[in-house]
Amino acid sequence: MTKRVAVIGSGASGLTAIKCCLDEGLEPVCFERTDEIGGLWNFTESVREGQACVMRSTVINTSKEMMCYSDFPIPKEFPIFMHNTYVLKYFHMYADHFCLKKHIRFNTAVDYIKRAENFSETGQWDVQVTDKMNMKTENLIFDGVLICTGHHADKHMPMISGLDRFKGKVIHSHDYKDSRGYEGKRIVIIGIGNSGGDAAVELSRVASQVCLSTRRGSWVLNRVSTNGLPLDMLRGRRAITFLLAKVPFLFQPFIKKQLNKRFDHRLYSLEPKHSPTAQHPMVNDDLPNRIACGSIQIRPDVKEFTETGVNFDDGTFEENIDVVVLATGYNFGFPFLDKSVIDVKQNEVNMYKYMFPPDLEKLTLAVIGCIQPIGAIMPISELQCRLATRVFLGKASLPPKDEMWKDIRMKKEAMARRYVQSRRHTIQVDYVSFTTELCELIGCKPNFCKMLLTDPKLALTCVFGPCTPYQFRIVGPNPWPGAREAIFTQWNRTFHPLKTRDVGHVTEKSLKTLFFLYILVVMIAIIFIQFLDWLY
């Protein structure tokens, strides 16, 4: 009998969950409480409580080749960094290509998920859902559950002295859609994450003044890096990840110097005390320009509000403030799930690979996409789904409970050593390292040493080039025959939307030269480091 799996949510993680279930011969039933797929990336004019949504102008921070699903490249005609409308269009293309929508029950809310009475023998789950159109409630039994609701749903509203008596408008960035209605206003934005930075830049074009308040400051990354190439395609490489792990102390000054080449973070009042890799990166292409033209002022943490203004903790004061935007992040959790299964406290949760509750008697439930990656989340969610579905079927095994707890503790300790203490630094993962961990459990990690003998061109491209998701489909379960070709043509798809005027091929030739010089330098560095390891 085919096992049935409940998939909660049809966003970036839910769609690939359905697809991975189908790949493994499982029967998915997806419950989506709205009337559309896309989750966070489905922009709506109105605010929906408990449902995250991008701003009207939001452009994704990861390049299309790094964020696509591993067996479905994003069309070459799409921009390198896609506006949210393109992201949603890609999700529809993916869903239609693999016939996923027929497995989704729209306008259906999940009321609760709890262990079935015979859970210790069967691992089954009792799921109650309500059809929001006719308010009909059903109780259903599933053999497995994939929770794909993300971590951008419930607003975190901090307690700030005097905010309750402030007479102006107070909104959370969750509720901010666009700059209409904010013309000529004096605005204070609290929080310097990606949402705060994006809102500040957009509002600064119409407001009379924007003050961006930050407790620690931030290093600011640009989407576009050296020679106009996508930053994540340059940074997200196995060779670079290896070097950063081996000699991080050598790279910190280099990274800091490169960031300050674009603009001096200290001069612009943005420089934090911590290193560039000690926080989740802020990606913003326009912030220094808006600071330079005076429309954004960087201010310290807020001490307290008055009825009409704000006192900052350096003793300065801003009067006649019209709007306060709280870009203070989210509280994630799973209110429909029995707390004895997963209990989230202060945005901290104990799950193996951020997926599996380690104490669960039967590993038939997994959380997908509850991570904050430095890199794209879609390929990681896909790998998590591939692992979970194979674990449900007994095709992949996880380590014993004590080993899972050991891995959880090690990750927490490593996170505490690297990152400044913050609510947002509880589910951080590095794209290359974490996908490698998942690939090892799935059995789809290529043997690059062996590949050097059988297919050296592919091996070198995978190790020294961008770690695009196609690498996860070269070998292992459910391989994709087009993976090798997709890897060799990834730069062609990247550059294609830029070629709107014929200027010859000088740029491509120079890029190839830089690429081979880059390979040479990295290979020498790796050999030297391995020699030091052997010597000592």
Image: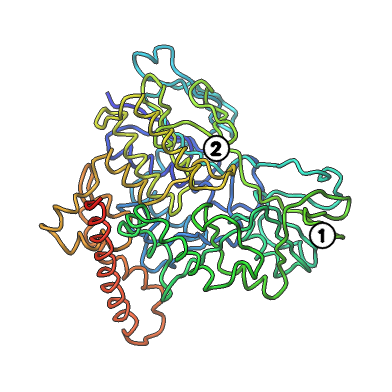
Choose mark 1 or mark 2, whichever is in front.
1
- Foreground residue among 456 and 394: 456
Read off the residue under disc 2. 33
Helix, strand or loop for disc 1:
loop
Q: Is residue 314 visible?
A: yes
Identify the residue shown where x is 45% and y is 22%.
140
Q: Is residue 185 left or right of residue 153?
A: right
Residue 316, which numbered label?
1
Q: Is residue 213 left or right of residue 127?
A: right
Q: Note whether 323 is above or below 363 in the view shown.
A: below
Q: Note whether 140 is above or below 318 in the view shown.
A: above
Which percent across, then down, holds residue 376? 43, 53
Crowd rating for badge 2 (residues with CA inside 10 Å; few <14, some 14–19, many 20+): many
Q: Residue furthest right?
A: 307
Q: Is residue 29 visible?
A: no
Which percent across, then down, holds residue 374? 45, 53
Q: Amino acid at mark 1?
A: Thr
Helix, strand or loop for disc 2:
loop
Identify the residue shown where x is 31% and y is 81%.
510
- Foreground residue among 69 and 430: 430
Q: Amino acid at mark 2?
A: Arg
Q: CA distance from mark 1 to mark 2?
A: 46 Å
Q: Note whether 368 is above or below 451 in the view shown.
A: above
